[in-house]
Amino acid sequence: MPRHCVNTLRGIVKCRANYTTAAKIAVKQVKSFEVGRERAMLREEDNILSNPVLAIFQEIGVNKNLYFLVFGESLLNDAVTIVLYMMMVGFSKADYITAEQIGLGFAAFICVSLGGLAIGILMGVVTALITKHTEDVRVVEPLAMLGIAYLSYLLAEMVHFSGIISIIGCGIVQAHYASKNISDKSKTTVKYFTKMVSAVCDTIIFLFLGMVLVDDHHTWHTGFVLSATILCLLVRFATVFFLTFCANKLERTHCINEEEQFIMAYGGLRGAVAFSLVIMLDETDHKNLFITATLFIILFTVFVQGATIKPLVKLLKIRRQATKNTSMFAEVNIKLLDHVMAGVEEVTGDHGGNYWKV
């Protein structure tokens, strides 16, 4: 692929990472009693993220715990993948790798991740403070939400931290606090802007994928391609089962049963991020082989796993989400209590969660 196309794709990957987390900004924070609103939010997030597994979960109506486990995993997985990719690219340029360099690499990985997260949380708090004083200038609210989120990405990249993890942290804080301060029109603006960018970026990336798929420069090696596919499946299943085992040991309110663990592991589809990273590899003798293997894995996971995930969810009898409509009286009562508690916090000077939201 021409170099200018690779540079364009690199920019799209960054933009796609930004809008993916901006989707967290566009939706409202879910409360335990807001099941009806939550189902609407699931539909919004599904459209924004363009994740076929989440779309199937929404169609079937699986329980919210499994939905958000898969949603959070897919969000963080892309961020961690890109950070690890950059670390491995650095290793590949070294003449030889020692145990000390490996240790420093993993230490740098933790530092880059936590540093980016800290910057993102800080910028999310800044957004909440700014949107507390925009009652008379509602027009700047979408700009504040999206602009500060992107600013957190730029700041993290400037100091060589993870910009994607930074914008994830910023998006979570904005969803929990800043989104309570902006008007409904501003929320609609943010939502549809992120949906538009989502559709554009996904379309462009998969156009690039189609161009590469029909290229004549593929290098096929059956053993390498099949072993890479099997290893991807085995490592994902092992990782998901190990991490969920550890999570269940921490006395979760809702333990993740074996059926849900299997669906989480089976629903890991490869797509735009994997393709974009392999395209950005330096020109080597084996680059075409890596591209061919990656394309095969993407097609296998999307068409085989994606097509069979719905029957498996029904076969394993995954828990469904109970539907419940919240009355207007309950909604008004909740808002009233939020404002009363915010007033109490203002009088006492002990500022808590309600102070930032109202």
Image: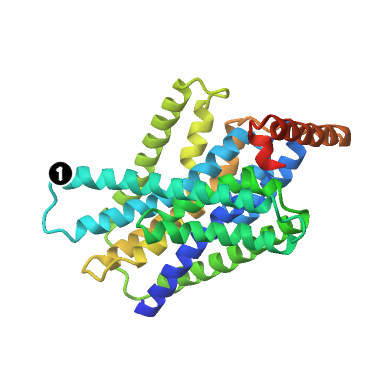
Q: Which residue is mark 1?
A: 100
Q: In this orientation, does residue 164 appear? A: yes
Q: Nearer the viewer, residue 158 or 3?
A: 158
Give the image location of residue 315, x and y in percent.
Answer: 59, 33
Left or right placement of residue 222 versus residue 118 in this view: left
Give the image location of residue 140, x and y in percent.
Answer: 69, 63
Q: Nearer the viewer, residue 131 or 232?
A: 131
Give the image location of residue 77, x and y in percent.
Answer: 44, 47
Name the residue type under label 1: Glu
**Total marks in image:** 1
Q: In this orientation, does residue 225 appear? A: no
* Residue at image coords 34%, 59%: 293
Q: How is the image coloured?
A: rainbow
* Residue at image coords 68%, 42%: 357
Q: Nearer the viewer, residue 303 or 155?
A: 155
Left or right placement of residue 137 versus residue 153 in this view: right
247 is higher (above) or lower (below) than 111: above
Q: Quadrant of the N terminus?
A: bottom left
Q: Quadrant of residue 345?
A: top right
Left or right placement of residue 298 versus residue 68 in this view: left
* Residue at image coords 57%, 45%: 173
Q: Quadrant of residue 342?
A: top right
Q: Which structural element holds mark 1?
A: helix
58 is higher (above) or lower (below) than 211: above
